[in-house]
Image (cartoon, rainbow, N blue to C red):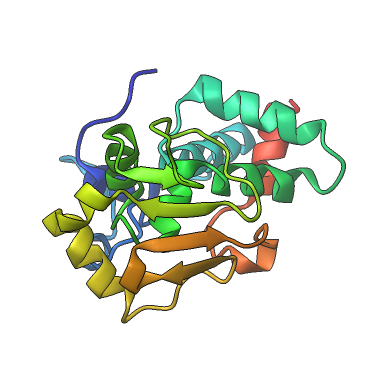
C-alpha cells in the first residue's frame, strides 16, 4: 500500500478519531462527527461483524502512525515474539519510530510533518543525521534539530507552541536549544490512544 497523501481530516472522520492529534482536526470532527461522503451520516446502521470491528481497530492504529500494512504487520510479529504484554510492546515499538518521537517532542505539529522533517535531514540523533522515519530510537538517545533547520518557520512556530504545552512524560525537551531526549519507554497508561490493541491482537491471530 502506498503512502496516503489525501486529507487527514477526511481519514479522521472515516475512522472516528483525530488521526492528526491537532486542535484544528478535532474542531472539524466536533462539527462533523460522521463519515465523509454523500451517505456519511447514514453509515454505521446495524451491528458490525466481529471481523469488521477488529479490522477497523487495526486500520485506526496504522493510520494514526502513518504506517503501511506490511511494515505494520512486521512490527506486530516482532512484538509478539518479545517477552511482555504483546499489545503494550507493540505500541512501544510504534512510539520508538523516529518520526513519532520528533512529533512527541513537538519539533513537528503532526507525524506527517515529522516524517517530512526527518526525510529532509533536519533531525540529528546523537549528533548524526538520520533521514529514515522508521529508525528506532533507543532510551537515552538525544534528538536535535540541525543548526540550519532551526530557522525554518514551521519549526520555530512548533517550538514556541510546545513551550505552552505539556510534553509527553517519556521524553525530555529543551525547547530553547531545539533538542530533547527519549528518556524511557512509555507505559500503556501514558498513551491516551483511543485504541483497543487487544482487537488488533485478535485480528492477526485469527
Is residue 101 visible in the rendered image? The answer is yes
User: Could you tell me which quadrant the C terminus lies in?
Assistant: top right
- Of 176 and 68, nearer the camera is 176
Q: Is residue 121 left or right of residue 38?
A: right
- Of 4 and 187, nearer the camera is 187
Q: Is residue 42 left or right of residue 82?
A: left
Residue that lies at the very extreme toward the bottom in this rendered image: 164
Is residue 193 visible in the rendered image? The answer is no
Q: Is residue 194 left or right of residue 204?
A: left
**Measured from the top left, where is residue 87 in percent x and y?**
72, 46
The residue drawn where x is 31% and y is 36% is 121
Task: Answer above or below: position of 195 versus 121.
Answer: below
The quadrant where residue 133 appears:
top left
Task: Answer above or below: position of 112 versus 153.
Answer: above
**Measured from the top left, where is residue 169 in percent x and y?**
57, 71
- Of 20 and 130, nearer the camera is 130
Residue that lies at the very extreme toward the right in this rendered image: 83
The quadrant where residue 66 appears:
top left
**Measured from the top left, where is residue 146 in percent x and y?**
30, 48
The residue drawn where x is 81% and y is 48% is 85
**Measured from the top left, where is residue 120 in percent x and y?**
26, 34
The residue drawn where x is 43% and y is 30% is 132
The residue drawn where x is 51% and y is 47% is 126
Task: Answer above or below: position of 72 versus 46.
Answer: above
- Of 32 and 142, nearer the camera is 142
Residue that lies at the very extreme toward the left in this rendered image: 153
Amino acid at each position: 500500500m502506498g503512502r496516503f497523501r489525501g486529507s487527514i481530516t477526511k481519514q479522521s472522520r472515516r475512522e472516528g478519531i483525530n488521526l492528526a492529534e491537532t486542535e484544528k482536526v478535532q474542531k472539524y470532527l466536533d462539527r462533523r462527527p460522521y463519515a465523509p461522503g454523500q451517505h456519511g451520516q447514514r453509515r454505521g446502521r446495524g451491528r458490525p461483524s466481529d471481523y469488521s470491528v477488529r479490522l477497523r481497530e487495526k486500520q485506526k492504529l496504522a493510520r494514526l502512525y502513518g504506517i503501511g500494512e506490511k511494515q505494520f504487520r512486521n512490527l506486530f510479529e516482532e512484538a509478539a515474539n518479545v517477552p511482555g504484554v504483546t499489545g503494550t510492546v507493540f505500541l512501544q515499538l510504534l512510539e520508538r519510530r523516529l518520526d513519532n518521537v520528533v512529533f512527541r517532542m513537538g519539533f513537528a505539529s503532526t507525524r506527517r510533518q515529522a516524517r517530512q522533517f526527518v526525510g529532509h535531514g533536519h533531525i540529528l540523533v546523537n549528533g548524526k543525521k538520520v533521514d529514515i522515519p522508521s529508525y528506532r530510537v533507543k532510551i537515552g538517545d538525544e534528538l536535535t534539530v540541525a543548526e540550519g533547520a532551526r530557522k525554518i518557520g514551521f519549526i520555530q512556530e512548533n517550538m514556541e507552541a510546545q513551550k505552552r504545552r505539556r510534553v509527553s512524560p517519556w521524553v525530555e525537551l529543551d525547547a530553547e536549544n531545539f533538542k530533547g531526549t527519549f528518556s524511557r519507554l512509555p507505559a500503556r497508561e501514558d498513551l491516551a490512544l483511543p485504541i483497543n490493541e487487544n482487537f488488533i491482537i485478535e485480528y492477526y491471530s485469527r
